[in-house]
């Protein structure tokens, strides 16, 4: 089963399970980030995240590229960017050849996780439009459900910062997500609200 199926399901997914998925996916991004050169997945979306029971994996590395060994920057590829979950820097890369880094991975996962936790995508793509719902430099969902408290909002918002220079890496955010998971598994969900 993939995450797209879960998002379309009528069965609600408990917050602790969602946080567990986030930590597992961030671990995958951390692995990509720590490669030399770092790997830019370029196609992180719900259909490329598979799970069974309590585990999930990131799949479909067909669009991935390795960055420059010195800078971690990806340049000059003719591959098409997929809009619904793509970072602004990925579009600039596609349009103008502007470099992208592994921080695009964190943005794409941030969009996926925002959809998982809120039920809304912060990017709307129509036939003739690409609309980013943002406040300043941070993408924002149309609304946060009451179950998503300030601690989770903060983590999601960190991941979907538009400017890649200000966006954290996987290693910058994974520990915070692990603490949230720890609180959830110890029955202290109120701490994440």
Image (tube, rainbow, N blue to C red):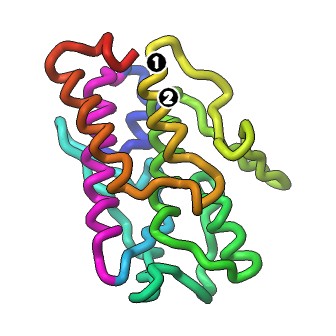
- Spot occupied by residue 173 in the image (x, y as percentages of width and height): 37, 46
Residue 153 appears left or right of 91: left
Residue 149 vs 2, above or below: the answer is above
Task: Determine whether 24 is above or below 15 in the image.
Answer: below
Image position of 155 (left or right of 179): right
Q: Which residue is mark 2?
A: 153
Toward which corner of the image does residue 10 lie, by quadrant?
top left
Above or below, comparing residue 102 to residue 186 in the picture = below
Label 1, label 2: how far apart the Cα atoms are:
6 Å
Q: Quadrant of residue 76?
A: bottom right
Q: Secondary structure at mark 2?
A: helix
Q: Is residue 85 left or right of residue 188?
A: right
- The image position of residue 109, as x and y in percent, is 45, 50
Q: Quadrant of the N terminus?
A: top left
The residue indicated by pointer 1 is 149
Q: Which residues are magenta?
A: 13-36
Instruction: Using a 10 Å C-alpha cutoff, classify the residue at mark 2 as few (fewer than 14 neighbours), some (14 to 19) or many (20 or more).
Output: some
Question: In which quadrant of the rendered image does the C terminus lie?
Answer: top left
Q: Residue at x 59, y 61 (%)?
A: 164
How far across and how far down the image is residue 155, in percent?
Answer: 44, 36
Residue 12 position within the rendered picture, expressed as x and y whole percent measured from the top left: 37, 20
Tag 1–tag 2 contact (CB < 8 Å): yes
Please give left or right for residue 180 compared with residue 160 in the image.
left
């Amino acid at each position: 089963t993939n995450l797209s199926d879960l998002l379309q399901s009528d069965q609600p997914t408990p917050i602790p399970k969602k946080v567990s998925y986030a930590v597992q996916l961030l671990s995958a991004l951390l692995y990509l980030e720590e490669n030399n050169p770092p790997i830019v997945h370029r196609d992180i979306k719900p259909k490329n995240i598979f799970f069974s029971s309590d585990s999930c994996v990131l799949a479909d590395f067909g669009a991935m590229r390795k960055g420059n060994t010195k800078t971690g920057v990806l340049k000059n590829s003719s591959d098409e960017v997929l809009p619904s979950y793509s970072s602004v820097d990925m579009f600039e890369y596609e349009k103008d050849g502007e470099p992208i880094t592994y921080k695009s991975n964190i943005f794409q996962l941030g969009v996926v996780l925002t959809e998982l936790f809120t039920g809304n995508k912060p990017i709307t793509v129509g036939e003739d439009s690409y609309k980013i719902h943002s406040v300043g430099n941070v993408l924002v969902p149309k609304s946060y459900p009451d179950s998503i408290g300030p601690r989770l909002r903060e983590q999601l918002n960190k991941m979907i910062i538009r400017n890649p220079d200000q966006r954290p890496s996987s290693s910058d955010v994974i520990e915070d997500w692990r603490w949230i998971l720890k609180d959830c598994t110890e029955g202290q969900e109120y701490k994440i609200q």
